[in-house]
Image (cartoon, grey):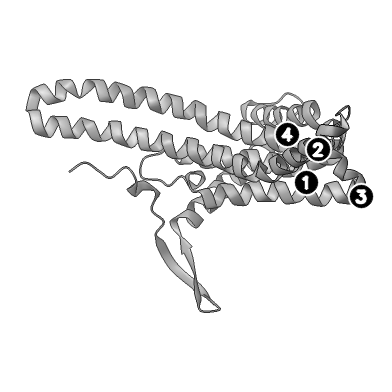
């Protein structure tokens, strides 16, 4: 029997924390791997910056490159004022990247393949944009929905489209990350399942034939490593673009 490619996304309870309003609050494998991701990030950053020197070593250089990469992304999309959101953007990037990479290790769990996680991250960004946008700009924040230079006779339609697309942002922001991680891991599992299936059913000929799916698994794993970084980067740069709307509405 080939392994079910969907089974790897199953959430399993590890222990019960308590009950609120008759609902069980449980610590799951998803919770565990989120803590593992946070722990890895903490250990990496502490280790990278513990021995700061004028001539940086490999770990310190990696920490400085990570900082500059995110700082440059923020400045290029949201301007220098966007740097006040650096802790949020950096934390999102590192969490998504490490969670994606940890999920590529066999017998682990990919938390970003669950839409409840990606929706929570997207809503965090969405609420931050709304709160900061109104706090900084007041009612002028509504200029975001009224592009300049639009003829009056089509302005109501344009405003409707802008408002509708604004509230769809958390949907597209979350589904993009979730769908890419889900599809990639299913493809890996399917091709990996072909290898023992061919070997068990066709003997030596099957094992020879299994070289092709093995090659596909290796190629897909390399592709998933790239996708793990790209999806963290795409989520981050979209966050910066949305934050720019809160900082400079109507631009």
Decide which of tag 4 and tag 1 comes sooner along the chain: 4
Categorize mark 2 by other alpha carbons within 10 Å: few (<14), some (14-19), many (20+): some
Decide which of tag 2 and tag 4 comes sooner along the chain: 4
Decide which of tag 2 and tag 3 comes sooner along the chain: 3
Would you name the residue on which mark 2 appears? 245
Q: Residue at x 47, y 44 (%)?
A: 113
Q: Residue at x 80, y 29 (%)?
A: 75
- Determine if residue 197 is in view: yes
Q: Residue at x 35, y 24 (%)?
A: 218
Label 1 with label 2: CB-CB less than 8 Å? yes
Which mark is nearer the camera, 1 or 3?
3
Mark pair 2, 3: CA separation: 13 Å
Categorize mark 1 by other alpha carbons within 10 Å: few (<14), some (14-19), many (20+): many
Residue 213 placed where, x, y %?
Answer: 26, 25
Would you name the residue on which mark 1 appears? 129
Would you name the residue on which mark 3 appears? 138
- Circle 3 — which element? helix
Categorize mark 4 by other alpha carbons within 10 Å: few (<14), some (14-19), many (20+): few
Would you name the residue on which mark 4 appears? 52
């Amino acid at each position: 029997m080939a392994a079910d490619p969907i089974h790897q996304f199953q959430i399993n309870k590890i222990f019960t924390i308590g009950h609120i309003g008759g609902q069980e609050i449980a610590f799951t494998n998803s919770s565990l791997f989120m803590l593992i991701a946070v722990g890895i990030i903490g250990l990496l950053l502490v280790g990278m910056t513990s021995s700061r020197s004028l001539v940086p070593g490999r770990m310190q250089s990696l920490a400085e490159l990570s900082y500059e990469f995110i700082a440059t992304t923020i400045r290029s999309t949201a301007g220098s004022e966007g740097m006040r959101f650096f802790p949020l953007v950096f934390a999102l990037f590192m969490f998504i990247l490490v969670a994606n990479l940890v999920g590529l290790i066999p017998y682990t769990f990919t938390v970003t393949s669950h839409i409840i996680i990606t929706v929570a991250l997207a809503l965090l960004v969405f609420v931050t944009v709304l709160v900061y946008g109104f706090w900084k700009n007041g009612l002028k924040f509504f200029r975001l929905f009224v592009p300049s230079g639009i003829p009056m006779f089509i302005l109501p339609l344009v405003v409707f489209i802008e408002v509708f697309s604004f509230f769809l942002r958390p949907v597209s922001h979350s589904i993009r990350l979730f769908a890419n991680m889900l599809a990639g891991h299913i493809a890996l599992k399917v091709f990996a399942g072909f290898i023992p299936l061919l070997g068990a059913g066709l003997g030596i000929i099957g094992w020879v034939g299994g070289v092709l799916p093995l090659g596909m698994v290796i190629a897909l794993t390399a592709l998933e490593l790239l996708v793990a970084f790209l999806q963290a980067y795409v989520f981050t740069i979209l966050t910066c673009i949305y934050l720019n709307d809160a900082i400079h509405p109507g631009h």
